[in-house]
Image (cartoon, rainbow, N blue to C red):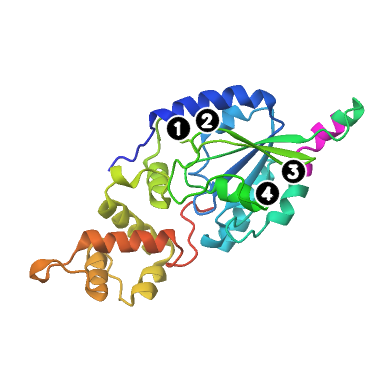
Amino acid sequence: MDYQWYPGHMTKAIRQMKEDIKLIDLVIELLDARIPFSSRNPDIDNLGQNKARLVLLNKADLADEAQNNKWIEYFKEKGIVALKINSKNKQGMKEINNAVNVACKEKIERNKKRGIMNRPIRAMVVGIPNVGKSTFINAYAGRAATKTGNKPGVTKGKQWIRLNKNLELLDTPGILWPKFNDRTIGLHLALIGSMNDNILNVSDMAYELIKKLKLFYPEAITTRYNIDGDDDPVQVMYQIAEVRGCKLKGNQPDLEKTCSIIMDDFRNGRLGKITLDRL
């Protein structure tokens, strides 16, 4: 299956962001900690040139902790300030103010030399759909400042949020890019829910996920479903269907329901802490 999704509103959104970037001091990019490479939008990299950068590995609680730390070091080596956070339980929020000051150190010092004091840093919050930008902003602001949801596309337009006298945030819609040259990137985005599930084949996604889990986390499937774990992903699906009682008429296995269970368990962390983009 070829994983591609680029609805028309994303073209409009990137056009608006190109205008808004002129007002911005800092680009705060949220990545999904399970796929730190695949969830980096190359259009945002181009957009954020010559701007201070801060990378937040969101949903770090769902990802492999050893891999989280490796990715933090990866960005550090590239000169990008990076933190791991969990917006839902506000883990890592206290470190963000200091990280903003570190990322914007040169800008703050230039302002001081020009006699510009106490001017708030203006930051644009960017990321792919369903990465948790709105939940992050609400957690950071300490109030329900934006709409939130567990599906891509909740944020439709831009919103300015003044957090305090030192920082203003511009929320933006989640955007992908027109074409994924690497099929693996498209697959990873589909697996974490950054595409519209209605255009995807859940059986194909579950098949690919099982292959990856057997490679990097072989105990994830066997432990969760109490099965021996065949080498063939299709046979694994049959085993899970049997254990979970997913049956159609005639006692045939309901593989579609089985695959939906597998995907839901992965997305909600029930298969363990898993990172698909590995260093």
Residue type (three-letter) at the residue carrying disc 2: Asp
Q: Nearer the viewer, residue 259 or 121?
A: 121
Measuring from the top left, give residue 270's x and y in whole percent: 43, 67
Residue type (three-letter) at the residue carrying disc 1: Trp
Q: In the drawing, what numbered circle is on residue 177?
A: 1
Mark 4 residue crowding within 10 angstroms, few (<14) / some (14–19) / many (20+): some
Mark 1 residue crowding within 10 angstroms, few (<14) / some (14–19) / many (20+): some
Label the magenta part by its dominant secondary structure. helix
Q: Mark 3 or 1 closer to N-term? A: 3
Kindly check if marks 1 and 2 are in contact, taking CB atoms under 8 A apart as contact: yes
Separation (CA) of disc 3 from disc 1: 26 Å
Q: Mark 3 or 4 closer to N-term? A: 3
Separation (CA) of disc 4 from disc 1: 29 Å
Magenta stretch: give its range. 100-110
Q: Is residue 153 left or right of residue 81?
A: left
Q: Is residue 207 left or right of residue 142?
A: left
Q: Residue at x 33, y 74 (%)?
A: 225
